[in-house]
Each structure stands twice: as C-alpha cells, then as structure tokens.
Image (spheres, rainbow, N blue to C red):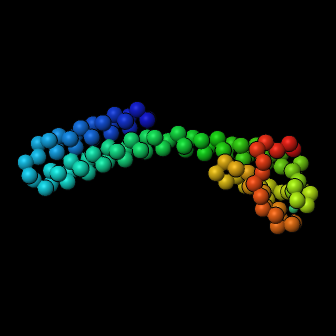
Amino acid sequence: MKVVLYVLAAVVFLLGLVFLAGNQGEVLRIVVGVVLMAASLAMVVAARMRPQVVQRNIVQRIDIGCDVRLQELACTKCGATLSKEAVSVQDGAVMVACPYCQASYQMEEAPKW
Ligand SMILES: [Zn+2]
C-alpha cells in the first residue's frame, strides 16, 4: 500500500513537471502543474504518516494490558486503590488521576505492580 502511494506520487509529480515544462505562458498549465506537484507531495507525506498510526495501535494494546492488572494499582499519594477510570494513556505516557485525593500525575516508566 505504501509503495503504491510512492509510485502514484512519482507519476503525479512527473505529470506536474510535464505541465510546467511544456508551459508557454498559459496560466492554466502553471496552476495544474503546481497543483499536481503539491498533490504528489501530499501523497508522500501521507505515506510517511502511516507508521505513526501503527505506533498508536501498539500504545492502545499496552493500555489494554494495563487495565487487566489495574486492580493491584494504588495511588502513590494517598494509597487508595485506583480504578480503570483513574488511569489513561496520553501520548504514550500513563496518566493517573486519583478520584480520592484529586492527585494527577504521570506514572514513572515501568511501574512495579
Ligand atoms: Zn490518591
């Protein structure tokens, strides 16, 4: 899928180049050429963004793994047992919001629970 996007981007880019190269002062040709080249660049950007989507899926899998063992998780400030709702994953970091003492903090690397 990624390779297809790159090939498509290259074809569209070349098409844009052809439009610009054959240009003899027509504004429409310049516009079409620039638009085609911009579209090809957007495709390359879209193709490069894909690995990040995969990483987000991995983070969500970790999230599920945390939930399973959450019953043994306690607030580091007041010691209260934290529920599933008190913990969330934001940008790959585990955030804890204690409903008892209202403490909100980021969990240190690998917690030993
Ligand atoms: Zn607490």
Q: What residue appears at the point 26 percent right and 47 percent down from the top-left corner?
A: 36
Give the quarter of the image for residue 57: top right
Q: Nearer the viewer, residue 76 or 113?
A: 76
Residue 1 in the figure: left or right of residue 80: left
Give the quarter of the image for residue 47: top left
Q: Nearer the viewer, residue 83 or 106?
A: 106
Q: Where residue 23 sits: x, y (%)?
A: 11, 46
Q: Quadrant of the N terminus?
A: top left
Q: What residue appears at the point 91 percent right and 61 percent down from the top-left corner?
A: 78
Quadrant of the rendered image holding ligand 1: bottom right
Residue 48 in the figure: left or right of residue 28: right
Q: Where residue 94 sits: x, y (%)?
A: 73, 51
Residue 6 in the figure: left or right of residue 102: left
Q: What residue appears at the point 20 percent right and 41 percent down from the top-left corner?
A: 17
Q: Where residue 16 sits: x, y (%)?
A: 22, 43
Give the quarter of the image for residue 68: top right
Q: What residue appears at the point 73 percent right and 46 percent down from the top-left corner?
A: 64
